[in-house]
Amino acid sequence: MQKSTIWTPNVNDCLRPGGCANGVVEPREMSDSSSITILLIDSHREDRQYWVQRLNISSQAYRVLETETGAAGLDICRTQHVDCVVTELTLPDMSGFEVLVHLVPRATHPDIAVLMLTHVTLPAMATFALNSGAQKYLIKSRISGDYLDRAIQRAIAFIGPRKNNF
């Protein structure tokens, strides 16, 4: 499956047959439990709060965990079931790329869905993230909460339910 460089909303996606619902599955199809656990790693408190709020509005099926450092995020992935990690590229203790490499050591066979959600708009960073195993590279200023919700659902559907902890 070929990945795009940067995934940004496109009004035409919703106008085509299958449109916005294409690739979106109901939470019960993605996991045996009634909730989907999302881990949001972002050192920017205001951004983190905004995206947590948007995800909680988008789906009641989400259990959203949050942290501000990569190390804390990796610890959460070791100790709890997480279906999808959404990480900022710039973190205080390590880069989002380091988080990605720890969670997805084999880029072509990811065991967990990882999305990059960042302010960094450099196409080379997006390409590197996607080639390193990220499912999507999303620019914060170019997406909505509903769009992030759809990206998470598609990523989890592509990877499949996570069977065990990292």
Image (spheres, rainbow, N blue to C red):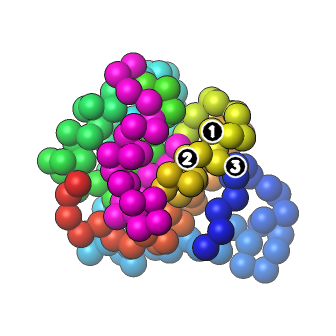
Residue 115 visible from this viewpoint: yes
**Can you tell which quarter of the image residue 143 is in?**
top right
- The front one of 14 and 69 is 69
- The front one of 42 and 132 is 132
The residue type indicated by label 2 comes to Ala
Q: Are marks 1 and 2 in contact (CB under 8 Å)?
A: yes
The location of residue 34, given as percent across then percent down, is 29, 67
Disc 2: CA contacts within 10 A as few (<14), some (14-19) or many (>=20)? many
Q: Which residue was labeled with disc 3? A: 6
Q: CA distance from mark 3 to mark 2?
A: 10 Å
Foreground tag (3 vs 1): 1
Residue pictured at 47% horizontal, 66% vertical: 108
> Which residues are the magenta region?
92-116
Compared to residue 18, the image places residue 9 above or below, namely: above
Secondary-structure class at tag 2:
helix
Secondary-structure class at tag 1:
helix
The disc at residue 129 is 2
Q: Which residue was labeled with disc 1? A: 125
Image quadrant holding the N terminus, namely bottom right
**Can you tell which quarter of the image residue 48 is in?**
top left
The residue type indicated by label 1 comes to Met
Foreground tag (3 vs 2): 2
